[in-house]
Image (cartoon, rainbow, N blue to C red):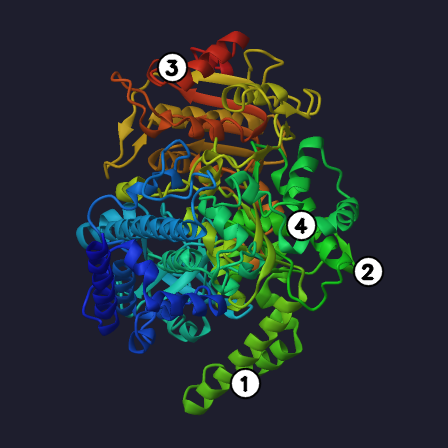
Amino acid sequence: MDASESSRGRARRAARGRRQRGESEETGSRARARTAAETTRATRAVKRRTAVRDLTETPTAAEETITYGKAASRDPRKAAEEREKLWARLGATKNGASGTSYAHLLDGGARAHGGSAASTSGTRSRGSNRAALRLGFAAHRERFAKGLKCELEEEMALSEKRLNTWTLERLVSEGYAILGMRARYEGMLQRDALVRLTIPFADASDMSPLGRELPYHRFTTGDMVQMSEGDEHDAAGGITGVVALRSMHFITVAVHEDDLARLIETGSKWRVDLSANTVAHDRSLAALVAFSEPGGMPGSSAAPRRTDDRKSSTSYSILQRALLGVPDENGTLEQLANMPPQWAGKEQKQNLAAAIKLVRDPLNPSQRVAVKSATSSSLAVWQGPPGTGKTRTLIAYIGAAVHLASIQRRRGKGPVVLASAASNVAVDNILEGLAKEKFVIDGRPLRVVRLGAPAKVQPWLQELTLDAQIAQHPLGRQAAAMRDAIRGLSGPAYARQRKQATQLELTAAKSILKSVDVVCSTCVGAGDDLLEDLTFPVTVLDEATQCTEPAALIALSKALSAVLVGDSRQLPPTVVSRDAVDAGLQISIFERMERLGVKVSLLDLQYRMHPLIAEFPSQAFYSGKVGSAPTPQDRPIVPGVAWPKPNVPVVFLEINDAECRAPDGNSLYNVEEAKTAITVVKKILASGDLAGPGDIGVISPYAAQVRLLQEEYGVLGTAKRNYLDYTDEDKMKELEIRSVDGFQGREKEVIVLCTVRSNTGGGIGFVDDPRRLNVGITRARRGLIVLGNRRTLSTNEIWRKWFKWIDQYGCALGDYKNFIGR
């Protein structure tokens, strides 16, 4: 035994020497966790949690960081090289399964192997617990880094394939490109220039704001686009922008002011392509690395002290360990999640009760339970089925958190809440709710700021954006005056003045962020460098089931505690790579916590739907636990069509015509369904009961059907002068036709759902996903109309249950002509 131990000791010393001399290549997560370089990186991560350059091996390599934002778009080759290096270092380029011994990270039913901390027997030493945690974090990082790599490569490959193999005619016909567009300057949107892109009439002047009706295209608000002069795609010399508005006759794009002069040059014509956006990937990867590091999240010093804790700054925080899902000797995962955060501990009980009372908006019992759980836990998870007021509950919790900070006299310590979500629409819903609630903090209104490109924010919320607030700040006004004085001029002197103006704006931004109570941003937006040095007492993450875990970590890694809000019975994150799905990227952090046994607070009263529209979803997806607040009198049935049962606002219309495959082979459509759906819409509108087409949503799981519906109906409304003129009234003039997936979180008075599938083989593709059905049938307030082929859809169990429910009420029509009165 002595000889054996001596041999092992010599082997360890030899291995340590090789690592120090740089003679061996690190291959496993255990080796990576023990190197001196990792220790150095952990210390740096405390100061700069999302800085990838602080995680490189050498001082030389430290200067070669991942390129973000505009820099990445201007030098994509360098950004790709840096990604490859980081992927390799994180184990994302390995062949075969990653982290298989830590399957329990994704599935609570799987057994842990190899020293996992999932057991709480109490016999394991503290050292082995720390080792197990390190291995767990390494496995987590490796698994999700691989998923991110696969997803980005798939997205870029699809984009490259389109550009390199599709004909120009196909790109245009499939809506990925528009040719012959002319740019017209429309003014400034904070620090971005707005240009209107139109296809001009042959005899129109360059100054005309109108153009021909645009062909079918896939550009929507918030999309990244690249503009190339002429008809050829110019990857290197193109201009990148963000779609601010799409309309029948034009799209409005926000671009960097330096690109404006070239865009609006007289006589120039532009090709516009959907552009790949790597910022989300790079920020997700950086957050994933920071999350895996001891000290990589704030609150490490708040972790329970142990007698052998030498450096609390390099420990894992309470939230960090809870989000990993591997408990330690301190107890179960549920106990870890329920540990009170440092900012709202047990001694704050009296203050917490006072803070909740100050929230004026009354809450129902399940909402009160959810808010109470969040104020006393490091990690709270809320399930919000459709229409149950999750945003309203979030607003109440945010108000309580800010009131508590006020009671604690937490002045001058920066913002209290980071309110984040997967989509811009969800963030704007929170922002609008906070604005309407009119909380009063210490005798003043609640201070809120919205991060992100102004072009992606709803017009009526523009004044709350960071850029708008910078424009009103004294330093911001000084910077704007400097920019106006040198606009259109070039040369070193003017470049220095622009740099000075940028520095003034940066100083103003930091001053604003330190003075507000709440920062609102998307998950990806939370990776902005402006938030790098801020620590939030709490992050609330709405739509937590709709974003990938690495994207969620961008926001979560900045907080001491967190509230996850979502619904695992609705659609998961959109992931295009099968390999990324296999790596677990489609499993949201919400669903993973739910699988691992973290207690979930269910919001159990819905306020959206007629009670009969809500009845089946409650039974099928929520075990009948979700009740309805509206009465039938609150949601009168929409006239204009012949509902089979006058008191039941649900109908299934049988469409037997066969489905067709789109020319690209990737989507499906059904002509008869589309014609019938639009006829139904026109009949309902003719009754005059609704405010306008904007009260109706027509949705389908298939992009080809969405396109056909748009062509069948056309787009109502007139061209607006510019983006800032677009109002709520304009929305009511336009029928909204979108995919089911794109409609999650939305609602309308009437929903028309086209299922498309109609074939002899019984194949229904991703229509068989129960979560997609749940989303599709829970968007309507007063009327739900479903079109499809019963025989085809009935090959799926959940659809058979829905038909059984429909038949119970006698709401199926074999001849849809009876419904529309012909």
Comes first in the chain, label 2 or label 3: 2
The answer to which image quadrant residue 85 occupies is bottom left
Mark 4 lies on residue: 398
Picture layout, residue 736 above or below residue 10 = above
Depth check: 693 or 522 in front? Answer: 522
Name the spot of residue 123 as percent of width and height, x first. 44, 42
Which residue sits furthest bottom? 493
Which residue sits furthest front? 2
Comes first in the chain, label 3 or label 4: 4
SS assignment at label 2: loop
Mark 3 and mark 4: Cα distance apart in space: 46 Å
For badge 2, the amino acid type reads Gly
Q: Which mark is residue 443?
A: 2
Q: Residues within 10 Å of mark 4 (few under 14, many from 20)?
A: many
Name the spot of residue 246 as percent of width and height, x first. 46, 51
Residue 356 appears anywhere in the view: yes
The answer to which image quadrant residue 8 occupies is bottom left
Picture layout, residue 535 above or below residue 647 = below
Comes first in the chain, label 4 or label 2: 4
Name the spot of residue 808 as percent of width and height, x first. 52, 8
Mark 3 lies on residue: 790
Q: Which mark is residue 15?
A: none
- Residue at image x 65%, y 40%? 373
Query: Which of pointers 1 and 2 indicates the residue nearer the eye?
Result: 2
SS assignment at label 1: helix
Mark 2 and mark 3: Cα distance apart in space: 60 Å
Mark 1 lies on residue: 485
Residue 721 appears anywhere in the view: no
Picture layout, residue 716 above or below residue 70 = above
Mark 4 and mark 2: Cα distance apart in space: 17 Å
